[in-house]
Image: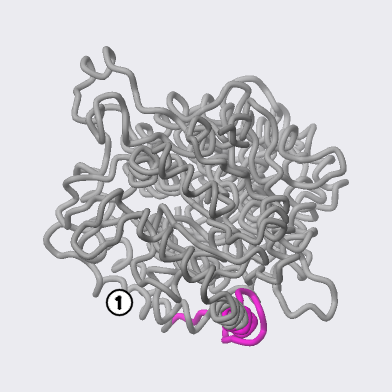
Amino acid sequence: MPNELRDAISPYLRSHADNPVAWHTWGAAPFEEAARRGLPVMVSIGYSTCHWCHVMARESFSDPELAAHLNERFVAIKVDREEHPDVDASYLAAAGAFTGNLGWPLTVFVTPEGRAFFAGTYYPPVPVQGTPSFRQVLDAVTEAWTDRRDEVEQNAGEIAAALAAASTTTGAGTGDNAGSDVTADEIQAIVTRLASFEDDEFGGFGRAPKFPIAPVQRLLVDVATSSSPAAPAARALVGRTLDAMAASPLRDSVEGGFFRYSVRRDWHEPHYERMLYDNAVLLDAYSRVGSFDVAAGIAEFLLTTLQRPGGGFGSAQDSESDLGEGGYYALDADGRAAATPPKVDEKVLTGWNGLAIGALAEAGVRQGRADWIVAARAAADRILGSSVSTDGVLLRATSERGASDAVATLEDFGMLADGLLRLATATGEVLYATAARDLVEQCLPASGDARVFAAPGGGDPVLAAQGLQLASDPSEGAYPSGLSAMASAALTLSQLTADARYREAAARAVRSVHDLALDNPTAFGAILSVGVALSDPAVQVVVVTDGSEGSDGPLADSARRVRRPGAVVAVVPEAQVAEWSAAGFELFEGRVLGAGAGAAATAYVCRDFVCRLPVGSVPEFEEQLAAVARI
């Protein structure tokens, strides 16, 4: 039976296009069909690098007899969780009412109104150790729907109401749970608490499975380069952690980049998919601590494996190839050259690309790699060109096939804005900064709205129409949340524009999750980084150059060694300074190239917009920097 997945943007959905299941893509139509036919809906959620998702597809969704049974009694929807994160989050929350073993593939049975009444994850084709077969699950759900419909709908309604109430009271970025700014004592406590989670034998945090938890590494780097008394302890902790990961099987020593996690505590038996988000954040961390070989390997993986034609980066590389799960990664360089590599999920996700844009831009100027900056610029140009609709709406995902109808989330707005600002200060090109400012402005709530930031448009339209849209989760795992990404972008904007609204919005974001973050810093690394930056004076460095070909010169090199958290460092050709100033970026007002004959560059060092006299020599410049920033 034909299904709707053949022309999908998502490779994960297209991998199910030949299933005999009558799959629908996410939207209002399948729920309308379910209501018309009086059937429940099965929502199956996964992603392209999910091993057990592919196993279930081979075992169950490819079985003609089982598919016929499914098509007769259910309306089936297939969802890529990376394309529709709001849908995944809503149903994952609902699934928690039925199972504590949450994960993917996520299998959720819902009413035609979208309300969940049963859920689970992977179901085998035959019963295994107390786990029912998929056919048994379908039969049990059908029996409940047919014989106990009133009870099913009542329970589903109660679960939906409970989730809505919980979301209202604990949603991200509201004043309901506001705390205070992050203090010096709390920064010390954060580092101490993180150290208590350290695996003293193998490095990293926790036991098995072992994840890199990249935002926490970046948090520790920020503390290590701050004025906090906890800086030495943070420096030692993050050094041990990053060194242990770099020397472990979690890192692909052949092609560069890091795998998503390891099954064992000693970092062995990696789960072999390589994700864009992990590698983008880890590139930033390794570059900032001076582990340039590791950083170069990560960047090369992004540029040679994930980069897409026309710019931008795919979301991940699969763990499976024709050599089986992880088989390709057991080969040496010569073996891989003769083998077919695992597939790349080519969909370009706006937010995740924002992470890569910022990391490549800053690492590129830090390590003198113009090709990394070129790749960052190409990604930014692609996103701004193809991920914005004709009516100006930001899109979540695109590919060579076109644009997805998935709405952009707060993480897309925040990560892209943050990445564009980092690219703008790295290249001196103001157009990226103005685009970032527009993204932040769109997410600043109207007067009277208790939220700190909110993506425009009200989220996924189907969930909204069903009353199932949940407030975004402020916690973080492998990458920053939308709240923390937007707070980081707003803080940078405040340093470029002197507009206090942006700094206050960033501070409110930190306060909104203050208590939660202090209790569990491993789940709030990125927002705590913003808190650390807010606790230090605002350091601003502008180097105006003559725009000549080649290197920007020794003043620019010194400026780019500034590591203070939250510091803004911009190297801008004199011809572009007026453009920044005219666009409303007050930091550039009056910044000119020195009047001395033949002056190639002039540096301005400021702290909270109070600037010292401009200088043109490296010794004078570094003397000023030493007073306000760690080099």
Number of other residues with Cα within 10 Å of mark 1, as a class: few under 14, some 14 to 19, many 20 or more: some
Point 46% across, 65% down: residue = 141
Q: Which residue is mark 1?
A: 192
Q: Is residue 424 visible?
A: yes
Q: Position of residue 229 (x, y in %)?
A: 37, 74
**Residue 174 drawn above or below residue 475:** below
Q: Position of residue 95 (x, y in %)?
A: 46, 69
141 or 409: nearer the viewer: 141
Colouring rule applied to residues: one colour
**Residue 437 drawn above or below residue 578:** below
Q: At numbered mark 1, what does the secondary structure look like: helix, strand or loop?
A: helix
Q: Is residue 292 visible?
A: no
Point 64% across, 75% down: residue = 173
Q: How many numbered marks are there?
A: 1
Q: Which residue is the extreme one toward the front? A: 147
Q: Quadrant of residue 469?
A: bottom right
450 or 422: nearer the viewer: 450
Give amino acid for label 1. Thr
Q: Quadrant of residue 606?
A: bottom right
328 or 611: nearer the viewer: 328
**Residue 86 drawn above or below residue 546:** below
Q: Which residue is the extreme one toward the top? A: 338
**Residue 360 drawn above or below residue 433:** above
What range is drawn magenta here? Answer: 162-184
Q: Find out whether residue 169 is within the magenta segment.
A: yes
Q: Find out whether residue 160 is within the magenta segment.
A: no
